[in-house]
Amino acid sequence: MILYRWLSRLPLPLLYALAWLGYVLLYFVAGYRKVVVMENLKHAFPDKSAREITVLAKKFYRQLCQVGLEIVKARRMDQAEFSQRVSVINPELMRERSQQMTQSVIILTIHQGNWEWMLHGVSAALGAPLDPVYKPLHNSATNQLMQEVRSRFGSRPLPLDRAGRDIVRRRREFRLLVMVADQSPIRRERSYWTNFMNREAAFYLGAETIARSSDYPVVFAQCRRRRRGYYEVEFHDLAQPPYQEGDHQLTESYVKMAEQAIRDEPESWLWSNRRWKREKSAG
């Protein structure tokens, strides 16, 4: 944590210089999850040549290092800077779905762009805190950093294993809930299998379970990188109540929107995640 705190004090231009060094170390020296990244890219984009896959992988590693240090910097950024660096294209859609900030809404997104900056940028644009539902990290120092980053400006992070009960208990309270739902569930968790980027993949059923139990509308938030250090967020309607029991259309719609967002800007998705580590026969 001492290193994180020290890095968060550095100006962004210097952090970006360090990010370039980090890219060289991760890609060329350590080869951090390089086999995973290359395999994921080859399956997702079978029509791309080996050279195109390599170029895309290098772009991914450069952005990964930049985003990682941007997240560290988020500890010391104020709301004005988040507003300047994260623009929301269509805040009116969220205001309509939330009935002018009185009806709770579930916001689903993916690990693309800067998902942590997006949390506070959207909060500043809408004038309401967003409560992120998160899966605790194994590394305690990194988990503590993420807690500090996510709990700023009135946001109340919810651990995934307690989110359902908390949301049902406080379902009459207005809140904007954010879930980054593109991670692979572990075997003991209920999951739904479907085709994702040309491969069978399991998805959490938590989002649709919460949506059914709360009758909250669901939107998809797409985060695009405009240039280094600047992002834009666009909302898309995903699902609205009433929901059909046993119908996984909400998850299918999420997967399709996630795929389209990734194809629009492939270099900024988290390809180092072992997204397809499970096989359907093992689930």
Image (cartoon, helix red, strand yellow):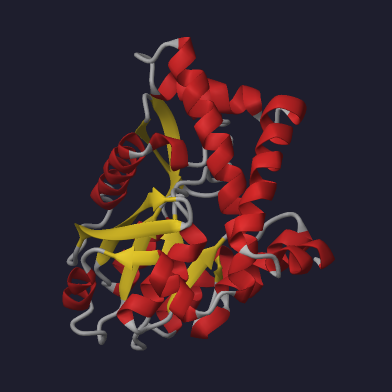
Please identify the residue farthest to the right as the structure is shown.
2
**Residue at left 36%, top 24%?**
198
* Figure quadrant of residue 28: top right
Image position, residue 142 (x, y; %): 72, 60
**Residue at left 78%, top 67%?**
6
Q: Please state which of residues 246 and 160 is positioned toward the viewer in this rendering.
A: 160
Q: Using residue 172 as the reference point, say whether residue 186 is left or right of it.
A: right
**Considering only vertical position in the picture, is 153 above or below 221?**
below
Image position, residue 163 (x, y; %): 50, 70
* Figure quadrant of residue 136: bottom right
**Considering only vertical position in the picture, is 39 above or below 159?**
above
**Residue at left 30%, top 38%?**
264
Image position, residue 153 (x, y; %): 51, 83
**Residue at left 33%, top 76%?**
125
Q: Please state which of residues 63 and 191 is positioned toward the viewer in this rendering.
A: 63
Q: Using residue 69 as the reference point, say whether residue 267 is left or right of it.
A: left
Q: Quadrant of the N terminus?
A: bottom right
Q: Please state which of residues 268 and 252 is positioned toward the viewer in this rendering.
A: 268
Image position, residue 13 (x, y; %): 60, 57
Q: Is residue 177 visible?
A: no
Q: Is residue 103 visible?
A: yes
Q: Using residue 156 as the reference point, say whether residue 52 is left or right of it.
A: left
Q: Please state which of residues 277 and 3 is positioned toward the viewer in this rendering.
A: 3
